[in-house]
């Protein structure tokens, strides 16, 4: 799984050196570019707070617009990290060790980006604290039947558990960086966050127990969080939304898009930082196979939606899906089908699974398709029960600026992460090396 003749010392040296070297000119240019996009995001939010949601393109019958599209998209991106870290850990899949650290970080950054959109979508965002289960100055409690409140609980719990899981996994590596630190401030910072890690037997025992417990807690969240998000739609009576297939359909799509983003970032960092011995073609092959399975599940869900719409005999339901495919937003629907159903089929062939350029382009197309899936679900329902309320939706520049700004925030966080923290879990990679086998030395180094 780990290419080359790696040793414990070479793993530590290779991964730690990335976080210890001075920032390169390319890194500074990239962080400057993404930081400017974050400033655009902050400016858009400021203008939204000053002027109101009228600056967006939302109106009856499309009352949610791109804000909820982007929210669901980013929550979906955040699913692969927890799945790689928790579920694959519980199933003892040793190949996860090279990719789990940056996948977990990606999860945290994606959830932060996701939380922006429902926070600003409420309109009077300075009253956002009303969604928390605390009595306010009017002795009012939040409406626990509101899907907005379900999102608050689901996503905040998911973020908290993911952050704890990521941080606990970092502790041994932070101890290594502390011991290698050459400046007082780095030694103090890493010493504080490594919580006195010395690598003793008792510390390893407690660490492994905590990691296992957090993995067990995080596993059901992979299924529950996006199920709750999908229920925002399913509890309504709108044709095309009022369906029980949404929870499994959304979960499969979230894992699909999350692994696509892991593939995109994995290809980039292995090339820029020379990590081909750690993130090997074996790892990329495993990711593409998972994407193939989840992509087929998503395609199956698309077919089920059309079949149930026809089989139900409900004319409103049937019209909603025909309108998706052949109505005014037909182009969005067929982009979704092309990217999410047709593109992953190339992963059947090992020739394409072994081609870095093909994998990179395919991962980008899948993420485009998954964004359009959320667009199709939210935006195409411009025609409901009453023709008199039919209308079209046109996003404004402020809709787009928030969406682009969220990408700037995501990549700014990711660039800071790869510069200052180990992007590969050194302690876990060492555990899968042949030298970690207790029989390795007794067998003359042949195992």
Image (cartoon, grey):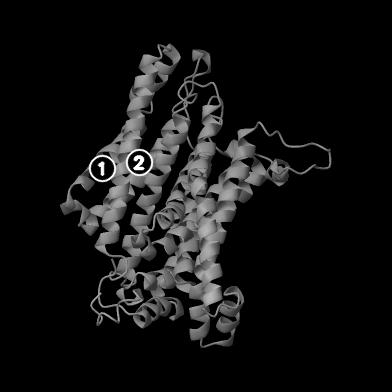
Q: Do the residues labelled 2 and 1 touch (CB within 8 Å)?
A: yes
Q: Mark 2 points at which residue?
A: 369
Q: Mark 1 points at which residue?
A: 343
Secondary element under disc 2, as helix, strand or loop, is helix
Residue furthest left as drawn: 351
**Crowd class of label 1 (few under 14; some 14 to 19; many from 20; radius 10 Å):** some
Q: How many labels does the image show?
A: 2
Q: Which of 381 and 291 is in front in this view?
A: 291
Q: Which of 218 and 166 is in front in this view?
A: 218
Please give left or right for residue 96 compared with residue 192 in the image: left
Residue under the image location 41 percent in, 61 percent down? 100
Q: In which image quadrant can residue 144 be found?
A: top right
Secondary element under disc 1, as helix, strand or loop, is helix
Q: Nearer the viewer, residue 306 or 39?
A: 306
Please give left or right for residue 212 compared with residue 151 in the image: left
154, above or below 160, in the image: above
| Image position, residue 51 (x, y; %) | 65, 42
Question: Residue 192 bears which disc, if any?
Answer: none
Q: Measure how far apart labels 2 and 1 are at the Cα level.
A: 10 Å
| Image position, residue 45 (x, y; %) | 60, 49
Please give left or right for residue 241 compared with residue 154 in the image: left
Identify the image quadrant of the N terminus: bottom left
Residue 172 at least partly seen: yes
Mark with earlier residue (2, 1) = 1
Q: In which image quadrant can residue 10 be found?
A: bottom left
**Crowd class of label 2 (few under 14; some 14 to 19; many from 20; radius 10 Å):** many
Residue 360 at least partly seen: no
| Image position, residue 249 (x, y; %) | 41, 35
| Image position, residue 303 (x, y; %) | 32, 27
38, above or below 371, in the image: below
Q: In which image quadrant can residue 296 be found?
A: top left
């Amino acid at each position: 799984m780990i290419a080359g003749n790696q040793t414990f010392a070479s793993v530590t040296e290779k991964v730690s050196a990335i976080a210890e070297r001075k920032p390169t000119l390319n890194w500074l240019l990239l962080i400057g570019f993404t930081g400017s996009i974050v400033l655009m995001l902050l400016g858009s939010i400021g203008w939204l707070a000053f002027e109101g949601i009228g600056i967006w393109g939302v109106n009856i019958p499309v009352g949610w617009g791109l804000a909820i599209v982007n929210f669901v998209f980013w929550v979906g991106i955040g699913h692969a990290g927890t799945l790689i870290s928790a579920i694959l850990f519980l199933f003892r899949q040793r190949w996860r060790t090279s990719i789990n650290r940056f996948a977990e970080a990606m999860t945290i950054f994606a959830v932060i980006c996701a939380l922006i959109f429902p926070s600003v979508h409420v309109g009077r965002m300075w009253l956002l604290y009303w969604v928390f289960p605390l009595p306010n100055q009017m002795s009012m409690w939040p409406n626990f039947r509101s899907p907005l409140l379900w999102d608050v609980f689901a996503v905040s719990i998911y973020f908290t558990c993911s952050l704890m899981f990521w941080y606990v996994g970092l502790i041994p590596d932070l101890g290594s960086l502390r011991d290698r630190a050459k400046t007082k401030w780095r030694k103090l910072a890493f010493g504080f966050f490594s919580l006195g890690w010395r690598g003793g037997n008792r510390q390893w025992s407690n660490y492994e127990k905590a990691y296992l417990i957090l993995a067990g807690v995080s596993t059901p969240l992979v299924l529950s969080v996006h199920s709750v998000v999908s229920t925002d739609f399913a509890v309504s009576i709108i044709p095309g939304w009022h369906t029980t297939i949404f929870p499994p359909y959304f979960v499969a799509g979230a894992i699909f898009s999350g692994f696509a983003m892991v593939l995109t970032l994995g290809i980039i960092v292995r090339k820029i930082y020379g990590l081909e011995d750690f993130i090997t073609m074996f790892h990329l092959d495993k990711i593409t196979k998972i994407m193939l399975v989840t992509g087929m599940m998503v395609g199956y869900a698309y077919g089920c939606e059309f079949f149930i719409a026809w089989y139900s005999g409900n004319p409103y339901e049937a019209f909603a899906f025909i309108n998706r495919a052949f109505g005014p937003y037909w182009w969005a629907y067929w982009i979704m089908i092309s990217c999410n159903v047709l593109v992953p089929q190339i992963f059947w062939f090992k020739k394409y699974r072994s081609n870095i350029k093909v994998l990179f382009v395919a991962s980008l197309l899948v993420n485009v398709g998954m964004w359009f899936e959320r667009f199709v679900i939210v935006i195409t329902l411009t025609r409901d029960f009453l023709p008199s309320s039919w209308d079209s939706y046109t996003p404004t520049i402020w809709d787009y600026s928030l969406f682009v700004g969220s990408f700037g925030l995501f990549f700014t966080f990711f660039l800071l992460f790869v510069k200052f923290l180990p992007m590969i879990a050194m302690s876990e990679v060492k555990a899968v090396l042949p030298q970690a086998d207790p029989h390795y030395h007794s067998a003359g180094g042949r195992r």
